[in-house]
Image (tube, helix red, strand yellow):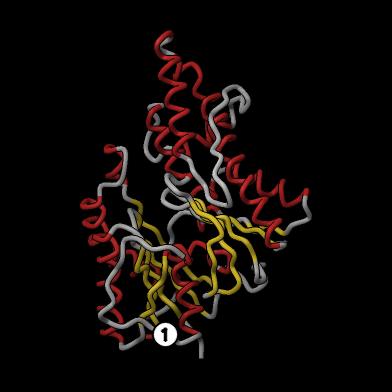
């Protein structure tokens, strides 16, 4: 009998639903929230209200696109955390109601596990997936981690940010430059037109495999402050070069620790995940690094890099096969590591 999993993602400002049958993705629907753009960041209360409005139509659309009736579902998987509590509560409550109504098990998913396991989402049978073990560089707005993945439920954090994440550095620096939220994609677009060697920004000296991006952010801000004193139009005149230099510095910081992790572990497969893995410069740098060092890279489709329900359904599929179900008194959580 086929295993059909409905995945629900509501950790931040996007409402997602996806359907997987026997490990193959049938549908992946996402409703984005534009309301946050005018505030320059996600407003938690507005996000949770939008999830309440979106979750029923998004789930309904995912089932219809998959050609699956709700009676065929084997289980419902949902993001339990980390994320915004109000947003997570909407998805958790919906999953509980659906589970009770259909009398099917409920599977809770760690959002970070979902990003790592997004590499196992297949749209057709012969889509390649990584073999265990592999190293995953998880880079997003809230997390920057190097993870040794020995199995779907066996992950070890080798290094992580001690302050800002890579995505935060992109977004906060972009905001200072006057770019719209989210700033990461705008930095990526401008960087393609700029000189990555034009400006030099501070790079951290953190021991081990941990990351830090707060010093880079401060260095970037000081560069702008000092330049604007003599030229008020400095940012506008140098946007492309600033973006290219910022992106190049972040990539260099990320790759420096990744190289060390590969050398220490001897693992020959490298994957990336999270919203920042959609960045063109990051993707090209990882591919080049793996090619030069005879490593096998796994770079996800851009639709699987940002928050999405396909990765939740995939993680839920693995847990379902192992009969790892979630009790009805489970509450969402805002913070957690791998």
Q: Residue at x 39, y 82 (%)?
A: 75
Q: Residues within 10 Å of mark 1 (few under 14, many from 20)?
A: many
Residue farthest toward the bottom in the current orientation of the protein: 1
Coordinates of residue 82 in the picture (x, y in percent)? 36, 62
Residue farthest toward the front in the current orientation of the protein: 207
Camera-side residue: 30 or 105?
A: 105
Coordinates of residue 80 in the picture (x, y in percent)? 34, 69
Coordinates of residue 248 in the picture (x, y in percent)? 59, 35
Residue farthest toward the top in the current orientation of the protein: 230
Q: Residue at x 37, y 64 (%)?
A: 9
Position of residue 239 relative to residue 42, above or below, is above
Q: Residue at x 68, y 62 (%)?
A: 265
Image quadrant assignment for residue 296: bottom right
Q: Is residue 295 left or right of residue 240?
A: right
Image quadrant assignment for residue 231: top left
Coordinates of residue 312 in the picture (x, y in percent)? 44, 68
Q: Is residue 288 left or right of residue 211?
A: right
Camera-side residue: 92 or 338?
A: 338
Q: Residue at x 59, y 59 (%)?
A: 136
Camera-side residue: 157 or 323?
A: 157
Q: Is residue 78 left or right of residue 209?
A: left
Which residue is identified by label 1? 74
Position of residue 303 relative to residue 224, above or below, is below
Give SS at disc 1. Answer: loop
Image quadrant assignment for residue 111: bottom left
């Amino acid at each position: 009998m086929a295993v059909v999993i409905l995945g629900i993602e509501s950790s931040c400002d996007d409402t997602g639903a996806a359907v997987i049958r026997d490990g193959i993705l049938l549908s992946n629907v996402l409703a984005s929230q534009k309301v946050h753009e005018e505030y320059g960041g996600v407003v938690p209360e507005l996000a949770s209200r939008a999830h309440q409005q979106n979750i029923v139509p998004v789930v309904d659309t995912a089932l219809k696109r998959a050609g699956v009736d709700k009676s065929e579902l084997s289980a419902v998987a949902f993001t339990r955390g980390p994320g915004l509590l109000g947003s997570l509560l909407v998805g958790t409550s919906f999953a509980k109601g659906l589970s009770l109504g259909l009398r099917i098990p409920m599977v809770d998913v760690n959002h970070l596990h979902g990003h790592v396991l997004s590499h196992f989402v297949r749209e057709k049978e012969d889509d390649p997936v990584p073999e265990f073990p592999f190293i995953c560089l998880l880079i997003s707005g809230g997390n920057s981690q190097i993870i040794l993945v020995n199995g779907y439920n066996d992950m070890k954090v080798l290094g992580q940010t001690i302050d800002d994440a890579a995505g935060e550095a992109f977004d906060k620096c972009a905001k200072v430059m006057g770019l719209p939220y989210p700033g990461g994609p705008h930095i990526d677009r401008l960087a393609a037109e700029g000189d990555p060697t034009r400006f030099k920004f501070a790079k951290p000296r953190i021991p081990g495999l941990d990351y830090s991006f707060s010093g880079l952010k401060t260095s970037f801000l000081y560069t702008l402050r000092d330049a604007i004193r003599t030229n008020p139009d400095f940012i506008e005149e140098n946007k492309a070069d600033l973006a290219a230099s910022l992106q190049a510095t972040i990539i260099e910081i990320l790759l420096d620790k990744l190289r060390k992790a590969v050398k220490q572990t001897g693992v020959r497969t490298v994957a990336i995940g999270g919203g920042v893995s959609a960045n063109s410069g990051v993707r090209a740098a990882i591919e080049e690094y793996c090619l030069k060092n005879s490593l096998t890279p796994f770079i996800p489709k851009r639709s699987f890099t940002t928050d999405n329900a396909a990765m939740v359904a995939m993680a839920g599929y693995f847990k379902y096969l192992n009969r790892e179900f979630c009790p009805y008194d489970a509450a969402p959580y805002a913070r957690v590591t791998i």
